């Protein structure tokens, strides 16, 4: 099931439009798009380990900028666009729980959740809705997004060849595992918070 998509992704990952496409996906994921940038980041670093740090930097910068859009959606447009995004992803329960926790643990929520598969858009929109300090939000976003994307890139840079071999041999396992992580992030938000 995943072979054609993987082969296509690896080919595109080395292409000239890969970095701009990664930036678009990373930006959009932080505010409204459902697919995490790891879907592009991982094959790009595997295809071009010599550009691992540049790829991680683009992914981080675009994610933080997309987080600003998510914050603005929460701050200015929650009654219309923000509520629509939360409803579309069925994140109402998680969002309501965040409202209680943000007052007391806002910085920790951003720092911890920004590293997990929990949808980052929920954090960015919630930060705007609850009027979380924008400077602290920005610094926490830079810290978590850079740690996440640079850690993934560093691991792939260091262990890329064996990782690529493992992915090639166990593609279905890896693909379903990744889908499970993404779905698990949404489920945690929906049912556990």
Image: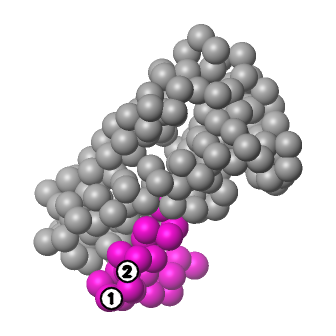
Mark carried by residue 57: none
Alpha carbons under labels 1 and 2: distance apart: 6 Å
Check the image and report above or below for 10 versus 131.
Answer: below
In the rendered image, residue 5 lying in the magenta stretch gets the answer yes
Q: Is residue 91 left or right of residue 34?
A: right
Q: Are marks 1 and 2 in contact (CB under 8 Å)?
A: yes
Placement of 22 over or under 135, stated as above or below: below
Residue 69, horizontal then vertical, whole percent: 59, 52
Query: Position of 52 compared to 125: left or right?
Result: left
Q: Position of residue 24 (x, y in %)?
A: 50, 70
Residue 10 among magenta residues? yes
In the rendered image, residue 55, in percent from the top left (x then y), is placed at 28, 66
| 44, 86: nearer the viewer | 86
Disc 2 residue crowd, few under 14, some 14–19, many 20+, Cα 10 Å: some
Looking at the picture, tell me which residue is in the foreground, 34 or 123.
123
Residue 150 lies, with reference to residue 91, above or below; the image says below
Q: Residue at x 27, y 51 (%)?
A: 150
Which residue appears at 51% of the width and 33% of the height? 134
- Residue designated by label 1: 15
Q: Main secondary structure of the magenta part?
A: helix
Q: Secondary structure at mark 2?
A: helix
Q: Give the residue displayed 29% in from the left and 84% down from the top.
A: 14
The answer to whether one can see residue 181 in this image is no
Point out the stretch of residues depicted in magenta. Answer: 1-26
* Residue placed under numbered mark 2 in the picture: 18
In the picture, measured across the screen, residue 119 lies left or right of residue 190, that is left
SS class, disc 1: loop
Left of 92 or right of it: where is 70? left
């Amino acid at each position: 099931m995943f072979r054609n998509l993987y082969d296509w992704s690896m080919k595109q990952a080395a292409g000239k439009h890969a970095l701009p496409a990664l930036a678009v996906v990373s930006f959009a994921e932080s505010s409204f798009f459902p697919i995490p940038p790891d879907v592009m980041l991982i094959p790009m670093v595997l295809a071009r380990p010599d550009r691992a740090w540049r790829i991680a930097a683009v992914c981080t910068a675009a994610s933080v900028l997309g987080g600003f859009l998510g914050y603005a959606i929460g701050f200015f447009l929650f009654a219309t666009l923000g509520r629509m995004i939360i409803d579309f992803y069925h994140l109402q329960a998680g969002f309501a729980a965040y409202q209680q926790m943000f007052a007391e643990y806002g910085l920790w929520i951003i720092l911890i959740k920004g590293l997990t598969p929990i949808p980052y858009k929920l954090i960015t929109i919630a930060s705007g809705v609850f009027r979380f300090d924008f400077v602290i939000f920005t610094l926490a976003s830079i810290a978590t997004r850079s740690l996440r994307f640079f850690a993934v890139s560093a691991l792939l840079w260091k262990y890329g060849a064996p990782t690529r071999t493992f992915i090639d041999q166990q593609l279905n396992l890896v693909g379903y595992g990744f889908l499970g992580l993404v779905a698990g992030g949404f489920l945690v938000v929906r049912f556990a918070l």
